[in-house]
Image (spheres, rainbow, N blue to C red):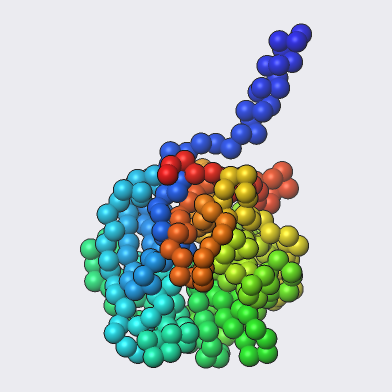
């Protein structure tokens, strides 16, 4: 009987263990704000913010683990002056209607915090080999600090979500609007979340870096909050899949962070994530950045040590995502 009980306990424990997939964390050192697209050709396409804030590079690999050794191809560099000449931040690569698009934020050398959102387009089948064309700035209702745009398609409509400052208060809110082209938005632009909870207002008042995943009859939006040091963390909004996404009342906010610093695994400031899957689509994967130490000297934005990481995204019995804790490093 004792042997049977031990066997049952071990079996129950094994079921709860997070599946192990073939990569080592971090996947890439000194790459923040990671974005991964698993394309229909079976390749993972990867881009991220580089520490120099001066260029956009792409990598591709058949597995997430192989991204660690994949060669980086620089597909665009900042201008010397004017728009898109400073603070090249948070690129994302998306495949829309037969073409590739990169969304990124950039300032001006003459006014480095005049950051706006821009788009590049490529019509080649392989985005690392094609020519990238500047489609210009995405125009919002107001001219203000704008960054971290992402796009997704839901129930036949394409949306853009982004972070932007507003005149009436310090900090950034996350806005949502429909798109009429891959480089422009149309109609109503609504703020679906602002930093109104204490853990969203440490160091800076921040809601930024939206990312979406549609599962179990719900649309989930993660976002990053607070300063980009060890206080950086992920929050979560949830909407019914049939709700009016442009109604702020459709979205409910988690009262606490869903992923935050975890000293036990020596991971600090996890945030700015995206979602992808295993190659066969059966397993959801969370990709994000964090540091493996807590104390930073100087401005966190000048610290290069945010690293790209990935871990399996689990699901609770009620259909909500279970982010767990940021897992420890596998390599040094």
| Quadrant assignment for the C terminus | top left
Find residue 4 and report its horizontal and vertical position in percent: 72, 12
Mark count: 0
* Residue found at the far front of this picture: 297
| Quadrant assignment for the N terminus | top right
35 vs 7: above or below: below
Q: Nearer the viewer, residue 149 or 73?
A: 73
Find residue 26 and report its horizontal and vertical position in percent: 45, 48
Find residue 127 and report its horizontal and vertical position in percent: 29, 63
For the question of whether residue 270 can be seen, the reply is: no
156 vs 256: above or below: below
Task: Choose top left, top right, bottom left or bottom right for residue 250.
Answer: bottom right
Find residue 91 and report its horizontal and vertical position in percent: 42, 69
- Image check: 92 left or right of 243? left
37 vs 17: above or below: below
Q: Nearer the viewer, residue 97 or 307?
A: 307
Taking the spot 29% from the left edge, 58% from the top edge, the residue there is 72
Q: Nearer the viewer, residue 61 or 113?
A: 113
Taking the spot 62% from the left edge, 49% from the top edge, the residue there is 263
Taking the spot 61% from the left edge, 78% from the top edge, the residue there is 172
149 vs 23: above or below: below
- Image check: 178 left or right of 2? left
Task: Choose top left, top right, bottom left or bottom right for residue 37.
Answer: bottom left
For the question of whether residue 70 can be seen, the reply is: yes
Taking the spot 28% from the left edge, 68% from the top edge, the residue there is 75
């Amino acid at each position: 009987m004792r042997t049977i009980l031990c066997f049952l306990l071990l079996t129950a424990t094994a079921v709860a263990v997070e599946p192990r997939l073939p990569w080592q964390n971090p996947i890439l050192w000194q790459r923040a704000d990671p974005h991964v697209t698993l394309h229909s050709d079976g390749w993972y396409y990867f881009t991220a913010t580089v520490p120099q804030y001066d260029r956009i590079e792409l990598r591709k690999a058949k597995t997430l683990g192989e991204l660690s050794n994949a060669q980086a191809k620089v597909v665009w560099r900042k201008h010397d002056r004017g728009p898109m000449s400073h603070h090249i931040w948070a690129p994302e690569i998306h495949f829309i209607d037969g073409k590739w698009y990169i969304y990124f934020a950039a300032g001006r050398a003459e006014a480095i915090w005049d950051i706006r959102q821009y788009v590049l387009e490529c019509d080649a089948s392989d985005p690392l080999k094609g020519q990238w064309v500047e489609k210009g700035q995405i125009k919002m209702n107001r001219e203000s600090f704008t960054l971290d745009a992402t796009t997704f398609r839901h129930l036949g409509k394409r949306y853009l979500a982004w972070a932007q400052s507003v005149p009436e208060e310090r900090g950034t809110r996350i806005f949502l609007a429909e798109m009429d082209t891959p480089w422009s938005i149309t109609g109503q632009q609504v703020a679906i979340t602002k930093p109104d909870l204490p853990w969203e207002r440490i160091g800076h008042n921040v809601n930024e870096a939206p990312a979406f995943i549609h599962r179990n009859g719900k649309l989930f939006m993660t976002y990053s909050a607070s300063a980009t040091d060890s206080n950086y963390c992920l929050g979560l909004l949830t909407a019914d899949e049939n709700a009016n996404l442009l109604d702020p009342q459709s979205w409910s906010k988690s009262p606490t962070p869903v992923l935050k610093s975890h000293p036990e695994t020596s991971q600090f400031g996890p945030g700015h994530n995206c979602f992808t899957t295993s190659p066969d689509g059966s397993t959801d994967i969370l990709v994000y950045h964090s540091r493996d130490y807590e104390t930073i000297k100087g401005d966190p934005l000048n610290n290069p040590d945010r690293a790209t990481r990935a871990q399996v995204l689990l699901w609770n019995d009620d259909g909500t995502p279970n982010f767990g804790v940021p897992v420890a490093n596998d390599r040094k």
